Image (cartoon, rainbow, N blue to C red):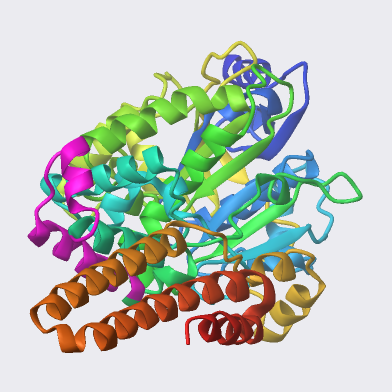
Amino acid sequence: MTTFAQILKDGYTFEGKTIFLGSSQTVEKDAGDLPVCLPISTLNRHGLISGATGTGKTKTIQGFLESLSKAGIPSVIMDMKGDVSGMAFAGSPHPKIDERLAHMSSVEWKPQEFPVEFWQLHGEGGAQLRATITEFGPQLLARMMDLTDAQQGALAIVFAYCDDKGLLLVDLDDLKTVLTFVSKEGKEEVENTYGSVSTATLRVLMRKILELENQGASEFFGEKSLELSDVFRTDGEGKGQVNIVRLMQSMRYPALFSTFMLSILTEVYYKLPEVGDIDTPKGIIVIDEAHMLFRDISKNLLDEIVSILKLIRSKGVGIYFCTQTPTDIPEEVLSQLGLKIQHALRAFTAKDNETIKKMAKNFPVTEFYDVETEMKELGIGEAIITGLNEDGRPTPLVRTLIAPPESRMDAITDSELASMLSLSDLIDKYRETINLESAHEILSEKILTARAEAEKIQAEKEAKKNPSLQDTLVKTATKSIGTEIARSIGKKIGGRQLGSIGAKIARGILGSIFK
């Protein structure tokens, strides 16, 4: 065995459990067809899967998800084109698969399906993903709304007020109600404690909310919000659940989509417990089209992502970014990624060549490969790979023939999707929204009470000017107050407990009291 073959064998032999990626491909005959594996214990060190369109990147992602599932590791994949939905069904033999397997003596290809749950943002088909406005926070919401620094500052004041007053911001109606309150009845109270917020800025925020509603964001904000136990779980056979977030429609709204991805990372980071270094990760999150995540990102938000990447490893979770070229990913993020799977890159211009030359420096130095040349000459389904060994050191760079997926390498049909959704225990759980008592209900009552009281005071003033009208005006104002409060209470009681019928009954009973 040559020196190179021995280096590869030593570099990809581990004591603990591993996942299989493919077989080595080298110019030295006796150094080829060695299994390229990675230790499972290092998968929470994050990674990058990149390559030009048509180089096999999606199939690599699919095979990676399969390996995770077989190892009992749940995963989440942001699916932009529906390409990995076929994982729910077993693959079929094909001459091209046979051709590939002929060069991979260590592979036993076994067609099989995997436990899949589908999720959606915009009616793509799946359990509805939701989050509350409070969970999102002002920073992510400001990114979604494309706010200026001044507008973001005003939004932060609104959140601070709600936090201090115990007002839960569940959906966009809550946020609109708070903005209305802050601009009128609560203006003095807010300014005395938190500083002034201009009416013009509040109007801009209201317009931005309307824009979000036009993009379908109302479907996303609300309860029931996602429970991570429904994501990071295994099936009866011990396979990790593959959570496919169908985002085909959401691609039309990049701000909503990219901010949603950030919210998932934040949610996982803050809600999962510390587990330290463990043999098997709790879960893996794969973000396709990752360049959208970092487009126009602020320095503060980028710093937060880097912090999450550094710390989320101790929660047992790995983050994997998928994109066409590594230059889509900021240097601060690239430096945190342990696994790199690089498919072919195409050089059509001098600038392309310079970019590839620069990217080649991201890989370990090796005397056996001209990395720059390899990146241009890789075939479909081939990649250069380097990961981390069990000691946290980079593994040798190796040109690899990626193993073919064992599940179907094609999208599922609409009828197949409908059949799967009918069997899911999560569809009904996340279908209906939960109407909690939140800022909208609480402040609406305060607004109604304040306005009714002002109406009564004004009526009394008018009555003093014209005593003959006093009895009529006071009676009218009192009835108005009663009607508004009855409507508010009826809505609260009926809306949350009895439905629309209960609301009508409550309005009828309470309204009659003030006749």
Residue 485, horizontal then vertical, whole percent: 44, 72
The answer to whether one can see residue 289 in this image is: no
Q: Is residue 199 magenta?
A: yes
Between 1 and 137, the residue placed more toward the observer is 137
Residue 400, horizontal then vertical, whole percent: 57, 39
Between 487 and 63, the residue placed more toward the observer is 487
* Direction from residue 405 to residue 162 in the image, left or right: left
The answer to whether one can see residue 176 in this image is: yes
Residue 271, horizontal then vertical, whole percent: 59, 35
Q: Quadrant of the N terminus?
A: top right
Q: Residue at x 17, y 89 (%)?
A: 468
Q: Residue at x 31, y 28 (%)?
A: 332
User: In which quarter of the view is residue 160 placed?
Assistant: top left
* Direction from residue 230 to residue 434 in the image, left or right: left
The residue range painted magenta reads 184-213
**Which residue extends farthest front?**
468
* Direction from residue 470 to residue 101 in the image, left or right: right
